[in-house]
Amino acid sequence: MYEYLTGTITVVTPQYIVVDVNGVGYKLLVANPYRYQENTEQTVKVYVYQAVRDDDISLFGFIDQEEKQLFMKLINVSGIGPKSALAILANPDHQGLVDAITNNNIAYLTKFPGIGKKTASQIVLDLRDKLAKESTGTLFAAGQDATVNDELKDALDALAALGYKERDIKKVQKSLIKEDQMATDEYLRHALRLLN
């Protein structure tokens, strides 16, 4: 499984881009290929998801980790395949999409191609709680505390991955913000001591 590719973008078409990595061209289906046009012939990092079917292996590309995470959530919804998820992500307002899902805004979701009321309702049903519970603001969070630096954010994400509850993480976050800046592993060790 690929996580990301680092290389130069050599081709931009309406459906896909090609990233040259050490002489090998990877065709990546992306939400909006023209976002990458200004980066042609420059070294870029593109996050990747590999989809394997009986008759096809495709690579899907994303501008950042957050976009990839949202894509992964969308394709886990019944009735949403990778290409439908890309069509949804082609809208650059990803925060608007997250807000629509968490606020049960079916009308917003049905504006996307191939998304009817039934599928929109399924998206809300499957993702509303998951997106609302994003504990530390990894995924397009509104209102992320400006004092949360990258190292602290990573440590809080690690706590969520370990299964700690959102309310416990928020309590620890308040304490850790008051500390001098540390490395991620130091924040994590400190947080675990506070939790235990």
Image (spheres, rainbow, N blue to C red):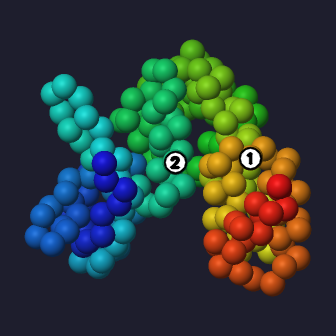
Which residue shows up at 27% across the image and 47% down it?
A: 59
User: Dot 2: within a 10 Å radius of its alpha carbon, few (fewer than 14), some, or many (20 or more) residues?
Assistant: some
Towards the viewer: 119 or 114: 119
Please identify the quadrant where the C terminus is shown: bottom right
Residue at the outermost left position: 23
**Rendered view: 126 above or below 30:** above
Residue 123: x percent and y percent? 59, 27
What residue is pinned by disc 1? 164
Q: Secondary structure at mark 2?
A: helix
What residue is pinned by disc 2? 69
**Amino acid under disc 2:** Gln
Which residue shows up at 68% across the image and 44% down it?
A: 163
**Rendered view: 50 above or below 183:** above
Number of numbered markers: 2
Judge left or right: residue 144 versus residue 80: right
**Amino acid under disc 1:** Tyr
Residue 14 visible in image: no
